[in-house]
Image (cartoon, rainbow, N blue to C red):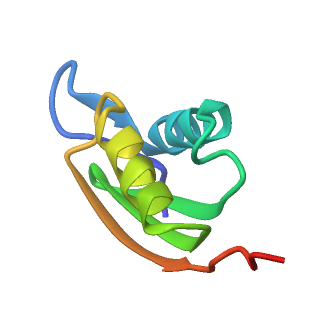
Amino acid sequence: GPSATLRGPGDYIDYAAITSRVKTAFATDPQVKATEVQVETYKGTVQLSGFVDSSESAARAAQLARDVPGVKEVRYSMVVRERSPQ
């Protein structure tokens, strides 16, 4: 479907831009950058899925996504894949 919607004068939100902002935030954050998180945006809701190496990284990713302008809600179903201690 279309990546943007027009709801009224001056109320234009480009969801592809939100997705790329979230991905950039993840890539530049030391705690999240090593994760494999997929980002999808629909009507201001960001859906995060994929893999993280700790529950802290998952929470950090959700917080970063919430801080992105235009994001109304963050839902996440990330799988914690613990790094092996060896």
Instruction: Write down the quadrant of residue 25 in the picture.
Output: top right
Splitting the image into 4 quarters, where does residue 69 fall?
Answer: top left
Q: Is residue 32 left or right of residue 3?
A: right
Is 84 placed left or right of 67 in the picture?
A: right
Residue displayed at 58% across by 67% down: 52
Relative to 78, say whether 60 is above or below. Answer: above
Q: Answer left or right for 40 relative to 12.
A: right
The structure residue drawn at horizontal position 45% and vertical position 65%, both measured from the top left corner, is 48
| 25 shown above or below 56 | above
Q: Nearer the viewer, residue 67 or 71?
A: 67
Total numbered circles:
0
- State the image coordinates of residue 50 (x, y, percent, origin top left): 59, 74
Viewport quadrant of the C terminus: bottom right
- Residue 80 location (% of width, % of height): 54, 78
For residue 34, above or below residue 53: above
Is residue 58 left or right of 45 when viewed as pictured? right
State the residue at coordinates (75%, 75%): 85
What x and y, as percent, mark residue 57?
49, 56
Q: Residue furthest right?
A: 86
Q: Quadrant of residue 81?
A: bottom right
Say if 22 sits above or below 54 in the image: above
Single out the residue that lies furthest toward the left.
8
Q: Nearer the viewer, residue 75 or 52?
A: 52
Which residue appears farthest toward the front when viewing the image?
86
Q: Position of residue 53 (x, y in %)?
A: 61, 67
Q: Residue at horizontal 36%, vertical 32%?
A: 68
